[in-house]
């Protein structure tokens, strides 16, 4: 069994895999990392590998304490990936984006793919049918947009994500919800339309913490899977084992 851990900027997501099958999925905060991993390992004693992809600021030590019982692997730019990376600054490309691109390449062979990860940031990643990673875009995520409006003004309250009641915001709260939610929905549909002008055919994968909220609001047809990153992490590691 393999325990995969995705350290994001806000939360940590972990999952236990038996081959390709996701057995159980966990979400926790950074300060509860070691305790949670210990509990998972207690529950799944057959775990042999711990595979970590991190874009957050968690000490490697927090994982290396499990080195005695398990093989611990940190995904880095030096791992083998199933695509050719055309990013101009490959060393600064987030490993989460690399893992998403690997998952898209392996799961959807011989086609153009657009991966949209709606987490702390929204990332767009495009891998063409020849398995060339082209790059994409980074923009603020839903929660970050609510927080920015509050943190950089005097009068705007910090609101929790909510569906806009009216398109025309009729109060401060309604205006913020309309602005934040509609802007991101238009953004995503706009990006997809722009890509469609460049590539007539591609599949679209939507993942990240806001997957469900966004999926039903988009006009475009997408493949929504909030576990896509963690599943791709398992596949990236299998690919490494087979190609090292
Ligand atoms: N319990 C929660 N805590 C924080 N964000 C949540 C929660 N539930 C849903 N969300 C939504 O998920 C988004 C954050 O996504 P996610 O958890 O994937 O981010 P992350 O952990 O920082 O990962 P990444 O850095 O890979 O984006 C926020 O915009 C928020 O609206
Ligand atoms: C964009 C984020 C924050 C998304 O999690 C992460 O992939 C990251 O820190 N990337 C580094 C910059 C880049 O991907 O070009
Ligand atoms: K993200």
Image: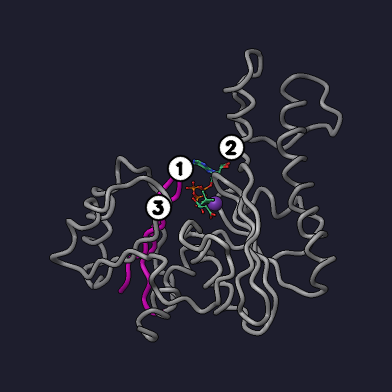
Q: Position of residue 223 (x, y in %)?
A: 67, 66
Above or below: residue 159 compared with residue 73: above
Q: Residue at x 62, y 79 (%)?
A: 108
| Magenta residue check for 123 | no
The yes-or-no answer for disc 2 within 8 Å of ligand 1 is yes
Is residue 39 toward the left or the right of residue 154 in the image? left
Label the magenta part by its dominant secondary structure: strand
Mark 2: secondary structure: helix
Q: Quadrant of residue 139?
A: top right
The yes-or-no answer for disc 1 within 8 Å of ligand 1 is yes
Which disc number belongs to residue 10? 1
Residues at circles 1 and 2 in contact by the CB criterion of under 8 Å? yes
Sort mark 1 into few (<14), some (14-19) or many (20+) by Cα contacts within 10 Å. some
Name the residue nearer the viewer: 175 or 127.
Answer: 127
Residue designated by label 2: 143
Residue designated by label 3: 7
Magenta-tinted stretch:
1-19
């Amino acid at each position: 069994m393999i325990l995969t851990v995705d350290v994001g900027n806000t939360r940590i997501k972990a999952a236990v895999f038996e081959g390709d099958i996701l057995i159980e999925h966990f979400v926790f905060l950074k300060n509860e990392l070691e305790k949670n991993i210990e509990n998972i390992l207690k529950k799944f004693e057959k775990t042999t590998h711990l595979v970590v992809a991190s874009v957050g600021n968690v000490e490697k030590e927090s994982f290396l304490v499990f080195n005695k019982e398990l093989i611990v692997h940190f995904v880095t730019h030096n791992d083998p990936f199933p695509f050719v990376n055309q990013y101009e600054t490959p060393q600064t490309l987030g490993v989460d984006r690399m893992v998403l691109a690997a998952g898209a390449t392996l799961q959807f062979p011989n086609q153009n793919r657009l991966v949209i990860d709606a987490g702390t940031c929204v990332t767009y990643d495009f891998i063409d049918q020849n398995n060339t990673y082209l790059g994409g875009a980074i923009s603020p995520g839903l929660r970050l947009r609510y927080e920015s409006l509050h943190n950089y003004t005097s009068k705007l309250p910090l609101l929790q994500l909510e569906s806009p009641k009216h398109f025309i915001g009729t109060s401060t709260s309604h205006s913020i919800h309309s602005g934040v939610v509609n802007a991101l929905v238009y953004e995503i549909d706009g990006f997809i339309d722009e890509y469609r002008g460049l590539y007539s055919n591609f599949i679209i994968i939507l993942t990240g913490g806001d997957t469900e909220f966004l999926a039903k609001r988009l006009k475009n047809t997408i493949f929504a899977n909030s576990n896509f990153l963690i599943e791709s992490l398992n596949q990236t590691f299998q690919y490494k084992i087979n190609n090292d």
